[in-house]
Amino acid sequence: MLAADKALEEDLFVSFPFAAYIPKTVTLKPRAGNPPPRLQETAAGLLNSIGLANHGIEAFIRDDLPRLEPMPVPVIASIAGERTEDYGRCAAMLDSRAEVAALELNVSCPNVELDGRALGLDPEKTRQATVLARQATSKFLIVKLTPNVTDIVEIAAAAVDGGADCVSLINTVHGMALDRFSLKPVLGHVTGGLSGPAIKPVALRAVFLVSRELDVPVIGMGGVTTAQDALEFMAAGATAVAVGTASFRDPLVAAAMASELGRLIKEHGIGSAGELIGVAH
């Protein structure tokens, strides 16, 4: 088993299947995360309730960045904060790190200034967090948006107004599951975030609306498991496409998707990937 793991790791570094890599979100201070169980498969996706468990940004810089430096693709660090000011402080700590090509602001983190609600539910807090990060770094700045809002275009516009270079959408959709025998919540935190094929229609709509209304690059994600999914996200307006849950089953799935995507683009009589972006509008 160890030999197989080592071989897979070597394969990943020789021919990495993604154009960029985003490690798990880190916060200013260490977080223990939510109580287990933390994962539950559903009929068409995966519920997770990790709770942003991480060992804090200082440990990330000290322990993780040296291990990520050999990555053959750009590394995009993902940061979140319990307070709005945390986004600026984390961005400042990563600004001088050559290992980090860009920053992602994960605004789905519970915010103490909003009584535990996610910062990304509030346009003004989203703008403020982006402003603070923008003031702290010259790196390419991505804001990852939650779909659990009334008007995602309003939130995206607030991020862009605050200085975001790009928005990525969507993060997970709120959900829960019950144990079939006890009829009690399966997850230790009761609720969690749903990812996987079930949320693709929600994600496509968000990408379509935001890319149509705002002149900013969009990274589309949510239920991407095949090249056809990637094709549709780009047609809806995504400049780039991210793969998350599908990689749990096959860490190399993105390589096959990229190869197949080229064939699909030609089948549709489209000259290039760039010409595909936004054709659904």
Image (cartoon, helix red, strand yellow):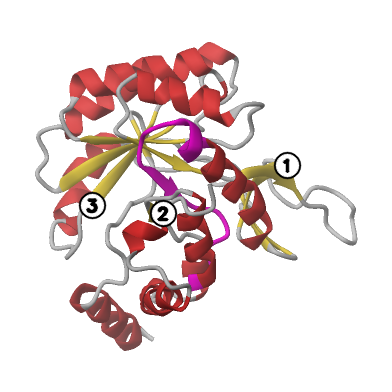
Q: Identity of the amino acid at label 3? A: Val
Residue 224 covered by magenta stretch: yes
Tell me if residue 1 can be seen: yes
Kindly identify which numbered label has been placed on residue 277.
2
Q: Identity of the amino acid at label 2? A: Ile
Part of the protein shown in magenta: 210-227
Tell me if residue 226 can be seen: no
Callout in the foreground (3, 2): 2
202 relative position to 110: left or right: right
Callout in the foreground (2, 1): 2
Pinpoint residue 205: horizontal percent, then vertical percent: 61, 45
Q: Identity of the amino acid at label 1? A: Val
Kindly identify which numbered label has been placed on residue 75.
3
Cα–Cα span, label 1 and label 3? 33 Å
227 relative position to 259: left or right: right
Which residue carries the number 1 mark?
190
